Image: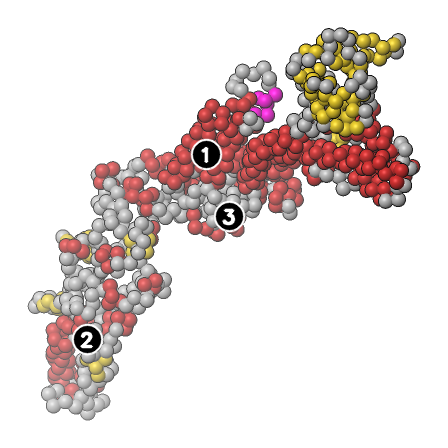
């Protein structure tokens, strides 16, 4: 169809008009530029309406979601004839008489220019958050400055000014407390309020000197002259002892730390006699108890592995089996059944067993008496010369006193008590006393008492002529390990120590590592108690002070020190 | 596509972020520090340094996107990297903590970082969801076009009410003079106005329509139709403002908290090393 378009524009001086031709099968009207009739106003839809020719006249069809009214009535499709008025958004389209050659003629006029309604509505519209006056920048500044001030600047000022620091402590969030990364280990809590006790210099890591202020007695791990490892020099106290991680972390207990060196110590140094060890469960040598030996006139300590069936050379004769006989063992009071605790008791620290003392433990049964007429009288234990002197004194006193009513005693000794002795009688009494002393000593030492437990040798001509072998029992088989009998009190002694079957005093009744491993293992074994090196061993076990030089390197600070 | 930044360069930055996360998690699992894992081991320092640099770089997006002449990558690429590396930061910083938290500046910094990242995740969600809903809601028109239609309806309403009684005219005037769109943050987010002047006018017109003489029934009906249409357009405009607010609001959390985080990060690092 062909359509004449007359665009009217009202001006103060009158109406101007501009004609143009629209040609097409249909003529589309809308805001989009692809329309043949393009009406640039937002109140017009993109495709607002379509004009088309049909036999019988021209028609207008409203677009989807657009509003078209013809002569005041909303329509979807309507036939239009000259004189009709079409409202389309703010436009008024009038159908005018079509000149020759045209199917339709329209005048178009914007009759409802944007009213003030729109501007007023816009002024009442706040269509974005930015338009409410909210400002990201302002809140960003507030957040930045507030956090920096409260959690950095204020605590920092507190480190310079003690009064301020004390004030800030009342609000822990804004004091140095806010910087605390974790709980203190319990031993350090009493001075924890002052960070500078340990953190002596700002931006410098805690120095050993700070630790050694209190821990003066801490020893080196090994003699630094014999075992000079770079690792020792580079290690600070805090490398191993980490603070602010609560109680459990102050002391390292991971065996990797030890195994780093000890797994192949022999490769690292020639100075050691220690065997390699990497893991208690899988890489620990058999126990090597320290045994006392007599070598070239002096006592030495020899470590012998339990695998090599070590023999104690204690100089004693003792059978654990006999003493633990469930039917009982002879005693002055008849048969008694003994248990381990009858003789072995824990020392007050509950770590070790108290050393066995004959006079405290054995003497209750093994009486050192010698005179059936005076059974309470005993000889002293531990010194042959004192035994002899004790017997000599005893029988000399009897002889001097007289009245000793035994048929084999000489008359001088059997005389009435108090009757004076002449010279010959005195000699006779002295001889008797000496004979009795010698006879009783021989009986006691060689037969009845000493020989029961001790190895006794006799060297005629020497005084005293008996020699009791010295007792050499180590008071600790494993002096470099900690073992608490108290912690194992739920286990019977004989579960670990094969005492019931031990008939020789040379037996070393230390259980082997296999016995420990029945319960203890490395951390990776799910059915064993995880036991690391530190379960039994210590680290600061050397004899030398821990890096003596560290004691002198007190670092003075003039920056944060109050 | 509003979410083109997610698929940018065939997920280049997603892959980079995954690589970083896998590397960090592997190192964390493999690392057996003395004592509990914490930020002070060598791995802790490494993760902390990476995390701090990431935070600075992520914040640099705010600078980069304003530098229109910059040729250092496209803003789309930067946004893609910002999203994926920001998510990776959550993992890296969490591993840096060694899962040790407390009431201190260190955990404050972490909490702020988590809040920033969570708001960012919401931002990604908003950018994926709301633009489509907005277009659908406005039927491809601009908001200003809706406002124009509403203003046009105001005029039509006034025309339609001319022959009706004063009360109705007052109601119509109230509708055209006092109807507000948007408003405070809460009003924008709620998406409707409980005291909408047009809704009130419609109610008053409907009330008085019951007593309208039959001769005036037709213009009254026409007015009701017009006011209903205006209400519908208002609802649509308010929905549009609501969606826009949904898309913008997270930035009011994301940006300020980022700067609070920057301050907390500085305090965290300085305090950590001043008392090393």
Q: Residue A39: x percent and y percent?
A: 73, 17
Q: Which residue is mark 1?
A: B47
- Tell me if residue A203 comes above or below residue A295 in the rendering: above
Q: Of helix, strand and loop, which one carries label 3? A: loop
Task: Give the chain of mark 3.
Answer: A
Q: Which residue is mark 2?
A: A325
Residue depth check, mark 3 versus mark 1: number of the one nearer the observer: 1
Q: Of helix, strand and loop, which one carries label 1? A: helix
Q: Residue at x 82, y 23 (%)?
A: A115
Nearer-the-camera pick, B237 or A363: B237
Q: Residue at x 69, y 25 (%)?
A: A63
Region of the chain picked out in magenta, as a range = B61-66
Q: Earlier in the sequence, mark 3 or mark 2?
A: 3
- Tell me if residue B186 comes above or below residue A25 in the rendering: below
Same chain letter for marks 3 and 1: no
Residue A346 counted in the magenta span = no
Q: Residue A335: x percent and y percent?
A: 21, 82
Q: Which residue is mark 3?
A: A183
Residue A350 placement: quadrant: bottom left
Q: Gap in Å between the C-alphas at discs 3 and 1? A: 23 Å
Q: Gap in Å between the C-alphas at discs 3 and 2? A: 56 Å
How many labels sit on residues? Answer: 3
Q: Residue A303: x percent and y percent?
A: 20, 52
Label 2 neighbourhood size at 10 Å, few (<14), some (14-19), many (20+)? Answer: some
The quadrant of the rendering that contains the N terminus of chain A is top right
Left or right side of A515 for B28: right
- Tell me if residue A207 comes above or below residue A295 in the rendering: above
Nearer-the-camera pick, A287 or A114: A114
Q: Residue at x 51, y 50 (%)?
A: A189
Residue A19 placement: quadrant: top right
Q: Gap in Å between the C-alphas at discs 1 and 2? A: 67 Å
Q: Of helix, strand and loop, which one carries label 2? A: loop
């Amino acid at each position: 169809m062909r359509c004449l378009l007359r665009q009217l524009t009202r001006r103060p001086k009158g109406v101007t008009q501009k004609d143009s031709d629209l040609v097409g099968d249909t003529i589309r009207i809308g805001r989009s530029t692809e329309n043949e009739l393009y009406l640039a106003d937002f109140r017009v839809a993109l495709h607002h309406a379509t004009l088309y020719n049909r036999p019988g006249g021209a028609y207008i069809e409203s677009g989807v979601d657009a509003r078209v009214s013809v002569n005041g009535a909303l329509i979807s499709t309507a036939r239009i004839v000259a004189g009709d008025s079409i409202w389309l958004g703010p436009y008024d389209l009038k159908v005018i008489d079509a000149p020759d050659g045209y199917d339709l003629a329209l005048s178009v006029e914007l009759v409802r220019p944007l009213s003030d309604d729109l501007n007023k509505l816009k002024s009442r519209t706040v269509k974005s958050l930015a338009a409410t006056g909210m400002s990201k920048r302002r809140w960003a500044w507030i957040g930045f400055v507030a956090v920096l001030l409260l959690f950095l600047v204020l605590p920092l000022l507190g480190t310079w000014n003690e009064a301020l620091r004390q004030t800030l402590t009342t609000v822990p969030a804004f004091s140095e407390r806010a910087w605390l990364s974790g709980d203190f280990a319990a031993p350090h809590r009493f001075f924890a309020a002052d960070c500078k006790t340990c953190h002596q210099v700002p931006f410098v890591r805690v120095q050993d000197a700070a630790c050694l202020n209190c821990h003066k007695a801490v020893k080196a791990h090994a003699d630094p002259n014999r075992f000079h490892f770079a690792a020792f020099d580079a290690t600070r106290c805090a490398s191993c002892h980490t603070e602010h991680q609560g109680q459990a972390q102050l002391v390292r207990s991971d065996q990797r730390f030890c195994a780093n060196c000890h797994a192949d110590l022999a490769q690292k140094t020639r100075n050691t006699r220690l065997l390699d060890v990497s893991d208690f469960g899988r890489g620990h040598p058999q126990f090597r108890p320290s045994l006392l030996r007599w070598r070239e006139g002096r006592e030495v300590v020899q470590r012998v592995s339990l695998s090599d069936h070590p023999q104690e050379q204690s100089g004693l004769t003792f059978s654990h089996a006999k003493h633990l006989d469930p039917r009982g063992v002879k005693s002055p009071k008849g048969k008694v059944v003994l248990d381990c605790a009858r003789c072995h008791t824990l020392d007050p620290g509950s770590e070790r067993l108290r050393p066995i003392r004959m006079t405290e433990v054995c003497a209750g049964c093994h009486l050192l008496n010698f005179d059936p007429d005076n059974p309470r009288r005993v000889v002293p234990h531990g010194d042959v010369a004192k035994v002899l002197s004790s017997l000599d004194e005893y029988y000399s006193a009897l002889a001097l006193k007289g009245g000793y009513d035994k048929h084999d005693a000489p008359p001088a000794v059997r005389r009435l008590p108090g009757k004076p002795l002449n010279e010959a009688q005195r000699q006779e009494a002295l001889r008797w006393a000496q004979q009795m002393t010698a006879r009783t000593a021989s009986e006691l030492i060689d037969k009845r008492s000493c020989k029961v437990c001790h190895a006794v040798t006799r060297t005629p001509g020497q005084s005293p002529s008996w020699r009791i072998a010295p007792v050499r029992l180590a008071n600790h088989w494993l002096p470099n390990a900690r073992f608490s009998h108290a912690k194992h009190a739920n286990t019977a002694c004989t579960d670990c120590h094969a005492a019931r079957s031990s008939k020789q005093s040379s037996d070393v009744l230390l259980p082997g590592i296999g016995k420990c491993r029945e319960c203890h293992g490395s951390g990776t074994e799910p059915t064993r108690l995880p036991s690391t090196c530190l379960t039994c061993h210590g680290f600061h076990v050397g004899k030398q002070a821990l890096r003596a030089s560290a004691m002198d390197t007190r670092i003075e600070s003039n920056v944060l020190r109050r | 596509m509003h979410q083109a930044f997610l698929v940018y360069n065939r997920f280049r930055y997603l892959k980079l972020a995954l690589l970083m996360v896998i590397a960090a998690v592997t190192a964390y699992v493999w690392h057996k520090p003395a004592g509990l894992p914490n930020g002070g081991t060598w791995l802790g320092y490494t993760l902390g340094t990476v995390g701090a640099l990431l935070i600075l770089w992520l914040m640099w997006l705010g600078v980069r996107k304003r530098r229109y002449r910059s040729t250092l990558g496209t803003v789309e690429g930067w946004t893609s990297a910002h999203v994926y590396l920001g998510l990776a930061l959550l993992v890296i910083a969490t591993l840096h903590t060694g899962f040790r938290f407390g009431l201190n500046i260190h955990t404050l910094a972490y909490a702020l970082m988590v809040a920033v990242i969570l708001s960012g995740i919401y931002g990604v969600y908003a950018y994926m969801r709301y633009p489509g809903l907005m277009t659908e809601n406005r039927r491809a028109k601009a908001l200003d076009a809706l406002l124009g239609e509403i203003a046009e309806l105001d005029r039509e309403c006034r025309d339609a009410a001319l022959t009706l009684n004063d009360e109705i005219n007052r109601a119509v005037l109230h509708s055209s003079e006092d109807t507000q769109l948007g408003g405070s943050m809460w009003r924008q987010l709620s998406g409707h106005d409980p005291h909408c002047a047009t809704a009130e006018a419609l109610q008053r017109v409907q009330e008085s329509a019951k007593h309208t003489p039959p001769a005036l029934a037709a213009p009254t009906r026409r007015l009701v139709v017009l006011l209903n249409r205006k209400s519908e357009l208002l609802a649509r405009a308010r929905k549009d403002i609501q969606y826009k607010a949904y898309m913008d609001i997270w930035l009011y959390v994301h940006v300020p908290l980022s700067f609070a985080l920057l301050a907390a990060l500085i305090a965290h690092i300085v305090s950590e090393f001043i008392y090393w």
